[in-house]
Image (cartoon, grey):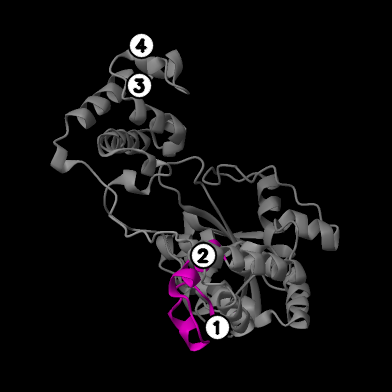
Amino acid sequence: MQPAILTTQGEVSELARRLAEQTIIAIDLEADSLHHYRDKVCLLQVSTPEETLLIDTLRCGHLDPLRSVLGNPSIRKLFHAADYDLRCLRRDFNLEVDGLFDTMISAQLLGEEKIGLADLLGKYFDVKLDKRFQRADWSQRPLSSEMIAYAAEDTRHLHRLAALFEQRLRQLGRLSWAEEEFALLEQVSFDTHQGPLCLRFKGANQLDRRQLGVLEALLQWRETEGERRDRPVFKVIGNQVLLEIARSAPQTEQALASRDGVGERLAQRYGRPLLKCVRRGLDCPEMELPSFPQRSRSVRDPLTERALKALKGWRLKRAAELAIEPGVLINNGVLDELVGVRPQTLSDLGTVGGLKSWQRREFGTELVTTLASVPSGV
């Protein structure tokens, strides 16, 4: 039997009334980021221990009736890989979640080799998820019966998985680790940073300022074209192609077509606007060219290198003992901060950016001891 699909504000209000009586609910959403310029939430799935319902967010509009439920910390909200979902709920509906339990983060802290929902449900409950619609366009209507069934499965089994993982986290003494990670995750939102697009573009730090000017012109054009065609920008032209054009700055259609990833077809379709972007970047006055903010870089002296090596050695050994990934235990950025601060006492650890409370509590003494053991001689 397929779940009911709610399409009106009245139905969502009635659902909110019923959810307010629950102590635990599972939530997921489907968006259309692979198919449109501006992605949006198209469907919200909600499962209580007794039933699963779908909310057609394209038809019912806002989700204000759910605000008090999602913001009530006494009602646990189960997600798997909540990061994107929480950002979307905040962006599209100004909704915040309090009381999060993320089964993917739990899987990482438990040392699961595979952390995808399909892998975990198959491993523990022999549930086979049909992932055919993972990349589907969820803005299309009507939804097929197969798509509806797929959507419902993503939350239907989260209650069992969360209960199993919570028990294991508690047994291993890691539940407080997970709870801190959940609380931090509840605060995420999409970056609304304004400024040159090229400064947020992967690989742009390899370019000089003139090349950055060309890249910025290319990116601005791609945004306009993606919006005009209502297509994700990566489906207009891929990132690596734009990076290559910015690096080589071809000034003829023939030269453009010879660039890696471009070819005759793309050059014929977009040659004129792309060459205009190249020329705009080349002609941009020097003072108007984008540039990365200057960052002070500490010199990696021998002591720093030894300290970092010691910390990574400790992390590798400790992660193996705990059977979790080293990067889950403590990431490289925090190790760099530790080396920079050189804490000598446990209280000094409070000044290390990115170091979480559970990491200080569980491993603070070991971190300070490891750094103290590094010889200062050449």
Image position of 192 (left or right of 260):
left
Where's residue 368, x and y in %? Answer: 56, 80
Q: Quadrant of residue 206?
A: top left
Q: Is residue 375 above or below residue 288?
A: below
- Single out the mark in the foreground, 2 or 3: 2
Q: Amino acid at mark 2?
A: Val
Tell me, yes or no, whether the two marked residues, 1 and 2, touch with CB atoms within 8 Å. no
Question: Which residue is disc 3 drawn over?
Answer: 270
The span from disc 1 to disc 2 (Cα, nearest Å) is 54 Å
Magenta stretch: give its range: 331-358
The span from disc 3 to disc 4 (Cα, nearest Å) is 13 Å
- Single out the mark in the foreground, 1 or 2: 2
Where's residue 135, x and y in %? Answer: 60, 43
Q: Is residue 204 above or below residue 45?
A: above
Question: Which residue is disc 1 drawn over?
Answer: 73
* Residue sitting at the far right: 126
Tell me, yes or no, whether the two marked residues, 3 and 4, touch with CB atoms within 8 Å. no
Mark number displayed over residue 378: 2
Q: Amino acid at mark 4?
A: Gln
Q: Residue at x 29, y 34 (%)?
A: 211
Q: Residue at x 46, y 84 (%)?
A: 348
Question: Which residue is disc 4 drawn over?
Answer: 254
